[in-house]
Image (cartoon, coloured by chain):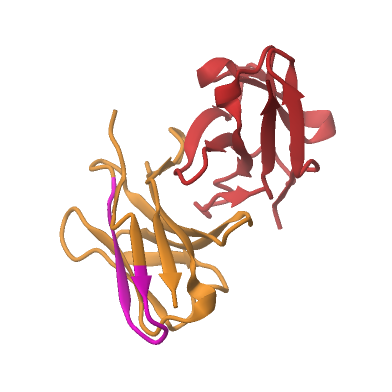
Amino acid sequence: AQSVTQPDIHITVSEGASLELRCNYSYGATPYLFWYVQSPGQGLQLLLKYFSGDTLVQGIKGFEAEFKRSQSSFNLRKPSVHWSDAAEYFCAVGPIQGAQKLVFGQGTRLTINP
Amino acid sequence: EPEVTQTPSHQVTQMGQEVILRCVPISNHLYFYWYRQILGQKVEFLVSFYNNEISEKSEIFDDQFSVERPDGSNFTLKIRSTKLEDSAMYFCASSTLTGFDGYTFGSGTRLTVV
């Protein structure tokens, strides 16, 4: 069965520093990959998605992610974080083989130090 | 930008009571979903709905849960007899047929069972 692993439960970075959030997936073929952000008490906002083509995808709020088939990874990056980036970040995979659901990782909570 | 609308934003109910969570998906989307997020945990799939029937459901979605599309715009999740462990944030989402455009999530309903 497909699965998503986000190895880092909590990451703290300083404002202005670069950021990389890790995501690994388990699936036999190339799935659709997503990153969502959830601010405290809020819903899920789509940051970016990958289906095919260019393996480096650009998203909103200055985020990008790179798909690496050999590593089954889809890591999220941002060159310089802002205090407003503090949130929970979820990697997700789907739909797969006619099953339309998304499978989410555990999430990574990002804290920004001033 | 089209939105998925959920009401209410917060509901408190007594254990054993029935609750209905309401959602208005994006009008041209064909798949509708409910997901659940227990506080501090990952987002979990509950059920998907297509062509006026359930297309997939998780183990969480037992006989206490039901979904309905009572008219052309609303999509509801009913919990017949709530338990304490049903306390969670419930997200509605909708997607196009292929999911290519990604899923759009609502802002969620926080259900508190006391």
What residue do we see at 29% from left, 28% from top?
B1
A47 relative to A54, above or below: below
Q: Residue at x 36, y 54 (%)?
A: B32
- Describe residue B14's horizontal placement relative to residue B43 as left or right: left
The verdict on residue B17 being magenta is yes
Q: Is residue A85 above or below residue B82?
A: above
Name the colour assigned to chain B in the rendering: orange
Q: Which of these two is toward me, B46 or A80?
A: A80
Identity of the residue drawn at 60% across and 22% down = A83
The one nearer the camera, B23 or A32, is B23
Looking at the picture, how far across and down is residue A75, in whole percent? Answer: 73, 28
Q: Can residue B38 be seen in this view?
A: yes
Relative image position of residue B42 (x, y in whole percent): 62, 54
- Which percent across, then down, holds residue B114? 44, 78
Q: In this view, does A54 lie above or below A37?
A: above
> In the rendered image of this protein, does residue A113 appear above or below residue A22?
above
Chain A's shade in the image?
Answer: red
The residue lying furthest to the right in this view is A71
Query: Which contiguous range is marked in magenta?
Result: B12-25
A44 displayed left or right of A81: left
At x 43% / y 33%, what residue is drawn? Answer: B101
